[in-house]
């Protein structure tokens, strides 16, 4: 094969200018310093720690700063000009020869695909390789338990340890769309674990985070990293997939891509027209594959959202329950699908105990899913199990604080805190939830209740006007009848505040 044409670069160090193929190119100061250092040491792999030390000197910066500069340089001088060496760092490879017969690319699976590369040991102690590798192995195991993902086994990715690789090429060779990489640093008895999720083909960063702990807490830190990375990757990858799917021509969409397009709307509907559009996408997916459990589950979750926004009556929304039962009968170990079926059974079917049992099956399949934890929190709240509900909501927020549906999760926490008698905490959580998801009706309901019980009557009545505008025909009898909260004390408390804000019997 013909070798790819590589650009000729000139670094005019004294003038701090970059020239590519004879033309001056704009380059940031940090990017120039990174390239200059890589160029000065082009015969070897330069560790991330070394680059951070020499380019940023005494500044305490995140590893993501280096990642941003590497991505910028690859755009300027070519994606293959700087190779990643998993577990070590980077190497400038402009002079490297391309293989005459590159390995054949593997086809991408029909679901999100991911490879976790060996992390870089930046502690300065090779004896800690066992720790670095252990975290990666645990991560791979945790991610492999999420049925909606295709995850490359550790035995494959660890063959790349210490080798100079191109992320795009790794994606092609392993047949994955996404790559997780990271490093571990040490300062005294403190350890810092840096992680980042990138799209293999483009190198675009999708998500990054940092975790810190002491050597004495090493096993706890390892568990936290595994739990939180696994939890955060699920919604971030699914969101990235949904954006990718939405750019495809509608004439070639598969059932999977149709579900991806509908997924963001299942939790956050701006208007009734969006509900209809998302429902149509999911019905098309079911027409293509009548046994598709995810499509059935997403219809259930979408319907719950529409009911929460008062666009459907409970009877209208309950028409999706046969689909929920089909998911329970044939969920194919899909934790998210089971969780959505379970909340439909509890909320729309008024079978709270049975819904809880279904979601507990989902939790057993994937205890690190923020979707599962959120639905588990809501059903425990319906049943008055406030301690369990608060624990599940709190954990869902802690492991995935940037979740696009964080407002709904926090609303559940706030409502449960009110139920437990922690009025100030509950109102604070609901006010934040309302700021995060101002169109979510459940937050308005919770705020009216919380303000009333705190004696903030004017605030309660002001929020009550918003509630009445959303549901003009609202009555106390229908509201209590259709509520999933059936505890007598809760119903009495709700009747009092509904009367107080002017809702008719």
Image: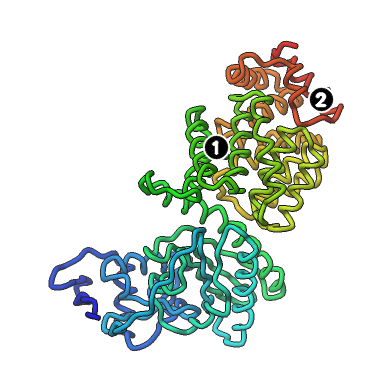
Q: Residue 191 location, x and y as percent?
A: 61, 73
Left or right of 25: which side holds 289?
right
Q: Which residue is mark 2?
A: 491
* Label 1 – label 2 distance at C-alpha: 27 Å
Q: Quadrant where the C terminus lies?
A: top right
Q: Which mark is residue 346?
A: none
Q: Quadrant of residue 78?
A: bottom left
The answer to whether marks 1 and 2 mark residues whose Cβ atoms lie closer than 8 Å is no
Which comes sooner in the sequence, label 1 or label 2? 1
**Label annotation for residue 268:** 1
- The residue drawn where x is 57% and y is 87% is 126
Where residue 225 appears, x then y in whole percent? 63, 66
- Nearest the eye: 352 or 291: 291
| Horizontal arrangement in the rendering, residue 2 relative to residue 91 (left or right) | left
Residue 366 drawn above or below residue 125: above
Image quadrant occupied by the N terminus: bottom left
**Which residue does the image show at 41% across and 82% down from the upper left?**
164
User: Residue at the location (32% across, 85% down)?
Assistant: 42
Determine if residue 54 is in view. no
- Residue 305 visible in the current orientation: yes
- Name the quadrant containing residue 446: top right
């Amino acid at each position: 094969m013909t070798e790819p044409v590589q650009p000729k670069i000139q670094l005019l160090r004294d003038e701090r200018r970059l020239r590519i193929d004879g033309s001056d190119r704009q380059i940031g100061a940090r990017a120039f310093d990174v390239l200059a250092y890589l160029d000065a040491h082009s015969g070897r792999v330069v560790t991330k720690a070394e680059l951070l030390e020499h380019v940023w000197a005494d500044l305490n910066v995140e590893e993501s700063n280096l990642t941003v500069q590497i991505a910028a340089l690859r755009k300027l001088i070519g994606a293959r000009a700087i190779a990643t060496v998993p577990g070590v760092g980077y190497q400038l490879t402009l002079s490297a020869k391309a293989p005459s017969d590159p390995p054949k690319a593997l086809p991408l699976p029909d679901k999100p695909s991911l490879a976790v590369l060996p992390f870089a040991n930046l502690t300065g102690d090779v004896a800690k390789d066992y720790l670095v590798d252990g975290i990666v192995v645990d991560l791979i195991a945790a991610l492999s338990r999420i049925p909606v993902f295709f995850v490359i086994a550790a035995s494959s990715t660890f063959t790349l340890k210490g080798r100079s690789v191109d992320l795009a090429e790794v994606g092609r060779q392993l047949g994955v769309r996404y790559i997780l990489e990271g490093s571990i640093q040490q300062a005294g008895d403190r350890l810092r674990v840096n992680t980042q999720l990138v799209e293999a083909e483009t190198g675009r960063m999708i998500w990054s985070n940092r975790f810190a702990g002491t050597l004495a807490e090493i096993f706890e830190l390892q568990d936290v990293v595994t739990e939180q990375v696994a939890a955060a990757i699920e919604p971030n990858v699914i969101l990235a997939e949904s954006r990718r799917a939405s750019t495809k021509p509608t004439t070639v969409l598969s059932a999977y891509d149709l579900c991806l397009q509908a997924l963001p709307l299942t939790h956050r509907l701006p208007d009734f027209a969006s509900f209809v559009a998302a429902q149509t996408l999911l019905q098309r997916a079911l027409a293509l594959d009548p046994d598709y459990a995810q499509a059935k589950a997403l219809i259930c979750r979408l319907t719950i959202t529409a009911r929460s926004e008062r666009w459907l009556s409970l009877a209208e929304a309950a028409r999706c329950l046969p689909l929920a039962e089909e998911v329970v009968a044939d969920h194919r170990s899909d934790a998210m699908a089971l969780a959505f079926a379970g909340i439909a059974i509890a909320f729309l079917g008024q079978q709270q105990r049975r819904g809880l049992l279904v979601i507990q099956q989902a939790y057993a399949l994937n205890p690190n899913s923020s979707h599962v934890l959120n639905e588990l929190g809501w059903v425990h709240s319906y049943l008055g199990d406030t301690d369990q509900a608060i624990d599940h909501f709190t954990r869902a927020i802690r492991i995935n604080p940037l979740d696009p549906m964080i407002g709904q999760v926090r609303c559940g926490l706030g409502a449960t805190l009110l139920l437990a008698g922690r009025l100030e905490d509950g109102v604070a959580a609901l006010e934040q939830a309302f700021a995060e998801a101002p169109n979510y009706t459940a937050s308005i309901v919770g705020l009216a209740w919380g303000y009333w019980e705190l004696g903030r009557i004017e605030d309660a009545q002001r929020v009550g006007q918003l509630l009445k505008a959303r549901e003009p025909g609202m009555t106390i009898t229908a509201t209590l009848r259709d509520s999933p909260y059936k505890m007598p004390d809760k119903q009495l408390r709700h009747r009092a505040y509904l009367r107080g804000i002017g809702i008719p019997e």
